[in-house]
Amino acid sequence: MSNTQIRIRENPFPYLFGLILLGYLVKRRADLVIFMDILGNLLDGPARPTRLAGACNLNYDNLMKFANVLLARGLIQVSEEEGHEQYSISQAGLEMHRQYRKFWEALYPI
């Protein structure tokens, strides 16, 4: 096995963790990063699940798992518009995302 070093980017915001699996470097996001990615994409306005999944680089099933947790915590809301389900960020979700960004900006100043 070679002496391989994993380099962390200067600002590893979207992809925090790398796992070495069978000798290959596989990038994997932490759950917290995915939750904040979903909230961040909803800052622009309500979105349908399939569009949100694409924007967050998740498949639909994984998005629904994360969205159900956010719904249960009151961080996002679901509404029905023109017969389609849409997700939007709640006030609690806005505050959570603000705190998260503040934390990362303190760690990795721009």
Image (cartoon, rainbow, N blue to C red):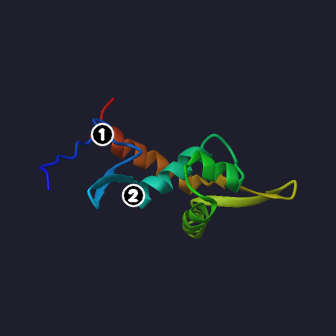
Determine the secondary structure under disc 2: loop
Q: Which mark is residue 30?
A: 2
Identify residue type, mark 2: Ala
Residue name at image x 35 percent, y 53 percent:
26
Mark toward the viewer: 1 or 2: 2
Q: Nearer the viewer, residue 26 or 101?
A: 26
Q: Nearer the viewer, residue 30 or 71?
A: 30
Viewport quadrant of the N terminus = bottom left
The residue furthest front is 1
Could you say where residue 86 lies in the image, as x and y percent from the top left?
A: 73, 55
Determine the secondary structure under disc 1: helix
Left or right side of 45 for 13:
left
Identify residue type, mark 1: Ala
Which of the marked residues, 1 or 2, is nearer the chain's N terminus? 2
Residue name at image x 12 percent, y 49 percent:
3
User: Given contact means CB atoms under 8 Å apart, are the residues at marks 1 and 2 in contact?
Assistant: no
Could you say where residue 104 lies in the image, as x and y percent from the top left?
A: 35, 43
Characterize the local packing of mark 2: few (<14), some (14-19) or many (20 or more) Cα atoms within 10 angstroms: few
Q: Please give the count of numbered marks on the rendered protein.
A: 2
Could you say where residue 68 lies in the image, as x and y percent from the top left?
A: 59, 68
Left or right side of 103 for 79:
right
Q: Is residue 107 visible?
A: yes
Q: Nearer the viewer, residue 38 or 61?
A: 61
Residue name at image x 17 percent, y 46 percent:
5
Residue name at image x 28 percent, y 38 percent:
9
Which of the 4 image quadrants contains residue 74? bottom right
The residue tagged 1 is 106
